[in-house]
Amino acid sequence: MIPRRNQGKVSEKGFTLIEGVVAVSILLVVLAIAYPIFQRYAINGNLKAAARDIMSDIANLKQRAMTENTTFSIVFNATNNNYTIQRAGVTIQTKTPTYFASDITITSTTYGGSTINFQTRGTTTAGTLNLRNSRASTAAITTNLTGRTYVQFNMQ
């Protein structure tokens, strides 16, 4: 018995080896181009996360100072690359921006004596904290007297 053909057409299913190799090659080229871009994005994302974490600590302590009717402060230490949260002069917690990535450093502060103080009426010490990562991207966290905080990023 002779197999029937569908009106002269042979129906084949699947891919040839050459089609598979071409598809994998294109995928590898796209991945080779995208990987460095993704890595840069991740490194800069860690800097943004660290800056936003510090901003949330500032907002939280301003609120706690008003709620608990006591003074709070954050002491930034660029030498040890950490900052200490204090309540009425007693250390509550020590944090570091390297929680998000080991390459984030505190480069400088313009707060008086590297300390931002939160008064019971909600005012704070005005100043700026500067962070830097391994790509030389920077984040400048600025606080005004009313406790309003914002960050400016310079991504490389």
Image (spheres, rainbow, N blue to C red):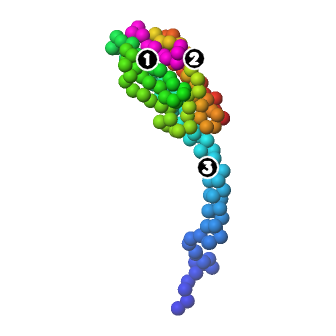
* Residue indicated by mark 3: 35
Q: Amino acid at mark 1?
A: Ser
The reply, left or right, for residue 80 in relation to residue 63 is right
Distance Cα–Cα, label 3 vs label 2: 37 Å
Distance Cα–Cα, label 3 vs label 1: 41 Å
Is residue 50 highlighted in magenta?
no
Label of residue 20 in the image: none
Q: Amino acid at mark 3?
A: Tyr
* Residue indicated by mark 2: 110
Total marks placed:
3
Marks 1 and 2, the one that precedes in the sequence: 1
Q: Which residues are magenta?
A: 110-122
Q: Nearer the viewer, mark 3 or mark 1?
A: 1
Q: Quadrant of the C terminus?
A: top right
Farthest residue to the left: give it: 68
The reply, left or right, for residue 43 in relation to residue 58 is right
Q: Amino acid at mark 2?
A: Thr
Mark 2 element type: loop
Residue at 50% x, 32% y is: 97
Tell me if label 3 and label 1 are in contact, CB under 8 Å.
no
The percent position of residue 49, horizontal first and vertical second, equals 51, 33
The reply, left or right, for residue 87 in relation to residue 38 is left
| Circle 3 residues within 10 Å: few <14, some 14–19, many ≥20 | few
The percent position of residue 13, horizontal first and vertical second, equals 56, 72
Q: Is residue 27 above or below residue 18?
A: above
The percent position of residue 11, horizontal first and vertical second, equals 58, 75
The percent position of residue 3, horizontal first and vertical second, equals 55, 86
Mark 3 element type: helix
Is residue 121 highlighted in magenta?
yes
* Residue indicated by mark 1: 73
Q: Nearer the viewer, mark 3 or mark 2?
A: 2
